[in-house]
Image: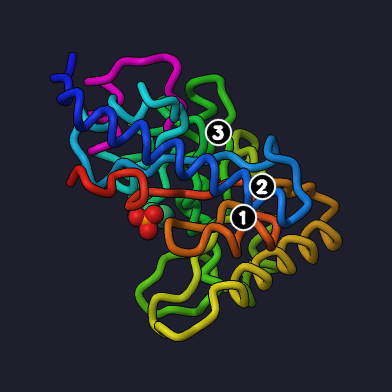
Amino acid sequence: MTDQVSATIQKRIDDNWQAVCDQVDAACCSAGRSREDVTIVGVTKYVDAAMTQALVRAGCHDLGENRPQVLWQKAEALADPSIRWHLIGHLQRNKSRRTVPLLHRLHSVDSLRLAQTVSENSAELGQSTSCLLEINVSGDQQKHGFDPTQIDQILPALIALPALKIVGLMGMASFDRPDHDPAVDFAALAALRDRLTATTGLPLPELSMGMSGDFEAAIAHGSTCVRIGSRLFEGVR
Ligand SMILES: *Cc1c(COP(=O)(O)O)cnc(C)c1O
């Protein structure tokens, strides 16, 4: 069990969630896309379990964490089967076995070795894990993710893994170049997806891209999953 937040904080989180939903609706509308095609993953890495639970109460059931240990702790503390957990940060291979059974989706497959481990651990559980390949589409030095120029070569080995279900790509706009237009990176990720689908025949329907500051541009470029943190916790942290 977790502590409850105050009514004032709950109200603010309810309002933030509603505002983000409204903006995602509007972005889908201007992009001529269906609202059902875009999932909002609420990124809870900034807040404790009580505040995370308040976001669920507000109506957000897809939650993203970037650190596996925190995901373990919150999954246990909240123990809520309505929550779909997404790992959006780097997974070290020695943390895979404990993480895999908790996940709805892994957004951050960033090496063949990790993919092999996740597939092995999934097979042990008799399940298949839904995954996205993280692509370092902006080429930022400090980011994880496959080099977009090398993914063609690695993809056949990834596809061959029996208990890894690759459903799409994940990427982030550049942090290195502050005046850079995020739309350039989103368009590049979407184009890469189209090319990989064409060359391998593997449908890659999911594109996890867009955060608090750039989700509108991501939706305009085909995002199916926006990962939003800061905006949901404005005024409460
Ligand atoms: C923190 C984080 C987010 C959310 O970022 P905000 O700008 O706070 O919305 C999204 N994706 C990843 C991978 C993150 O680490």
Mark 1 within 8 Å of ligand 1, using the beta carbon: no
Q: Earlier in the sequence, mark 1 or mark 3?
A: 3
Q: CA distance from mark 2 to mark 3?
A: 14 Å
Is residue 59 positioned above or below 86 on the image?
A: above
Q: Residue at x 55, y 20 (%)?
A: 126
Residue at label 2?
Answer: 206
Secondary structure beneath dot 1 equals: strand
Q: Amino acid at mark 3?
A: Thr
Secondary structure beneath dot 2 equals: strand
Instruction: Give me the disc on residue 143.
Output: none
**Label 3 near label 2: C-beta < 8 Å?**
no
Judging from the image, the colouring scheme is rainbow
Magenta stretch holds residue 29 = no
Instruction: Give me the disc on residue 169.
Output: 1
Number of marks in picture: 3
**Label 1 near label 2: C-beta < 8 Å?**
yes
Q: Residue at x 47, y 52 (%)?
A: 108
Q: Nearer the viewer, residue 92 or 205?
A: 205
Is residue 78 positioned above or below 109 on the image?
A: above
Eye-nearest disc, 1 or 3: 1
Q: Which residues fall within the magenta stretch?
A: 70-85
Residue at label 3?
Answer: 129
Q: Amino acid at mark 2?
A: Glu
Mark 2 within 8 Å of ligand 1, using the beta carbon: no
Q: Residue at x 52, y 48 (%)?
A: 115
Q: Earlier in the sequence, mark 2 or mark 3?
A: 3
Q: CA distance from mark 2 to mark 1?
A: 6 Å
Eye-nearest disc, 2 or 3: 2
Percent x, y of residue 29: 71, 49
